Image: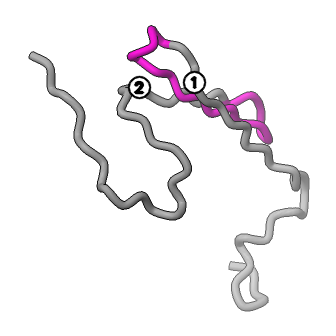
Amino acid sequence: MFAGHSAFKKIQPFWSAYRTQNYGYSKFHFVNGTHLLVEWVDDEQDGKVTDSNWIIKHKHGAGTYDCHLREGKRL
């Protein structure tokens, strides 16, 4: 039994650059502590990777993290 595709809303949000009705999945390749490759694998194109993006953390090393600082105090 084939489930079919859900339809998109007619109005495309401003942040949505591209839409496809194809089924697929994302693959995450953690290369190291600063580089992540994200790929979209299209099941309807026999597993072809149809999109990919690198996420790179440029700021790294000792003393470069400030997310633990709140109102000037260390938590």
In the displayed structure image, the side of residue 10 where residue 17 appears, left or right: right
Q: Is residue 33 magenta?
A: yes
Amino acid type at circle 2 is Gly
Specify the quadrant of the image occupied by residue 64.
bottom right
Secondary structure at badge 2 equals strand
Residue 35: x %, y % from top left = 77, 37
Residue 8: x %, y % from top left = 30, 48
In the displayed structure image, the side of residue 59 where residue 36 appears, left or right: left
Residue 52: x %, y % from top left = 65, 31
Q: Which residue is mark 1?
A: 50
Crowdedness of circle 2 by 10 Å Cα count: few (<14), some, many (20+)? some
* Residues shaded magenta: 30-47
Residue 70: x %, y % from top left = 70, 84
Secondary structure at badge 1 equals strand
Q: Which residue is mark 2?
A: 24
Check if mark 2's residue and mark 1's residue have beta carbons within 8 Å: yes
Q: Label 2 vs label 1: CA separation?
A: 10 Å
In the displayed structure image, the side of residue 71 where residue 65 appears, left or right: right
